[in-house]
Image (tube, rainbow, N blue to C red):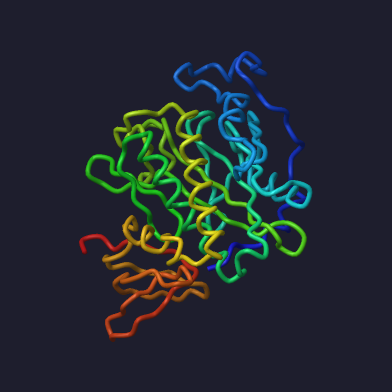
């Protein structure tokens, strides 16, 4: 379960767009929904970019194709800790190249550049999507006041009307010369309304009854949480047990203890009970014939009624 190589995406990078700050709207359409004000890039920088912290730069663009693609294209020239936020993405991607789209300023769409380097063995970099999920869930619970759960390996779930809905996703990709860095992209539906849902299984923090949906404090909380979790994990040499990551992820993982179907590459599938997340970040399934099989890559379907 290692981040996929993003080097092939670099050629599709759109032209860089300068920061947008309140009062500098490029067209009237950006202000058409007054319940969705733009992020304040300068304020976010003051709060998050500091000496000794993980975040070294933070840019907000009004629109782009994909923050992951943009950041991956600059991975060699930027230091670790670069953050790119978009008010709107036209070509946002999830796992298996699924499209991720939402109205402008209805969510948080951002990517961060991480370079674990020699501090963490490459075989442990597969924990980065799971680590990010823990950090996002922790940050949102502090500020939004809404219960969240994690679906292995990279979905954020909320409860809407008694039903689990996907409100966010994470995509980690290797980037830079020799794959020396990892770009981790996060998409979170914040104020998406019922009539704006792209698919029936989607949800948002607002639909889940969040106490707060102001995106500025939400982004600050998520990035501060990611700073803490990543720093602890890196300082522990990427050891998921020593850093507390493995235990915390298991505690918040809605997939564990349920019957699931793993749809694997090569049109193969496995059905069984999800019993653990092992030291390599793989989901362990106990099948009907008594075999425990680890799954490192694939699409996981929660089987209903179990």
Q: Is residue 35 above or below residue 218?
A: above
Residue 66: x and y in percent read: 63, 43
Residue 113: x and y in percent read: 64, 49
Q: Is residue 188 above or below residue 8?
A: above
**What residue sits 47% from the left and 44% below the top?**
225
**What residue sits 37% from the left and 54% below the top?**
150
Residue 262: x and y in percent read: 40, 69
Q: Is residue 230 above or below residue 44?
A: below
Residue 100: x and y in percent read: 52, 45
On the picture, is 195 further left or further right than 62? Answer: left
**Towards the viewer: 127 or 88:** 127
**Towards the viewer: 69 or 235:** 235
**What residue sits 57% from the left and 41% below the top?**
110
Which residue is farthest front? 52
- Quadrant that contains the C terminus: bottom left
**Towards the viewer: 204 or 183:** 183
Residue 58, by quadrant, is top right
On the picture, is 75 further left or further right than 48? Answer: right
On the picture, is 63 further left or further right than 186? Answer: right
On the picture, is 177 further left or further right than 3? Answer: right
């Amino acid at each position: 379960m290692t981040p996929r190589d993003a080097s092939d995406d670099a050629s599709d990078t759109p032209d860089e767009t300068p920061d947008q700050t309140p009062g500098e709207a490029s067209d009237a359409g950006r202000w058409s929904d007054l319940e969705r004000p733009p992020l304040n890039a300068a304020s976010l920088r003051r709060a998050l970019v500091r000496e000794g912290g993980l975040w070294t730069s933070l840019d907000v663009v009004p629109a782009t194709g994909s923050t992951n693609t943009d950041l991956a294209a600059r991975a060699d020239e930027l230091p670790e800790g670069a953050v790119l936020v978009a008010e709107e993405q036209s070509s946002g991607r999830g796992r298996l190249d699924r499209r991720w789209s939402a109205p402008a300023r209805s969510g948080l769409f951002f990517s961060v550049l991480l370079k674990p380097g020699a501090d963490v063995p490459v075989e442990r970099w597969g924990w980065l999507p799971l680590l990010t999920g823990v950090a996002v869930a922790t940050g949102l619970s502090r500020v939004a006041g809404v219960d969240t759960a994690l679906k292995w390996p990279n979905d954020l779930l909320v409860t809407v009307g008694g039903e689990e809905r996907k409100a966010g996703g994470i995509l980690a990709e290797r980037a830079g010369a020799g794959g020396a860095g990892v770009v981790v992209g996060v998409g979170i539906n914040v104020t998406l309304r019922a009539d704006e849902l792209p698919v029936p299984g989607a949800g948002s923090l607002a639909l889940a009854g969040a106490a707060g949906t102001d995106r500025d404090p939400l982004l600050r909380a998520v990035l501060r949480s990611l700073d803490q979790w990543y720093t602890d994990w890196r300082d522990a040499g990427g050891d998921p047990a020593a850093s507390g990551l493995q235990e915390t992820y298991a505690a918040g993982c809605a997939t564990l203890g349920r019957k699931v179907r793993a749809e694997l590459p090569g049109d193969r599938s496995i059905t069984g009970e999800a019993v653990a997340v092992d030291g390599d970040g793989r989901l362990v399934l106990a099948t009907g014939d008594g075999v425990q099989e680890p799954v490192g890559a694939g699409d996981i379907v929660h089987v209903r009624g179990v």
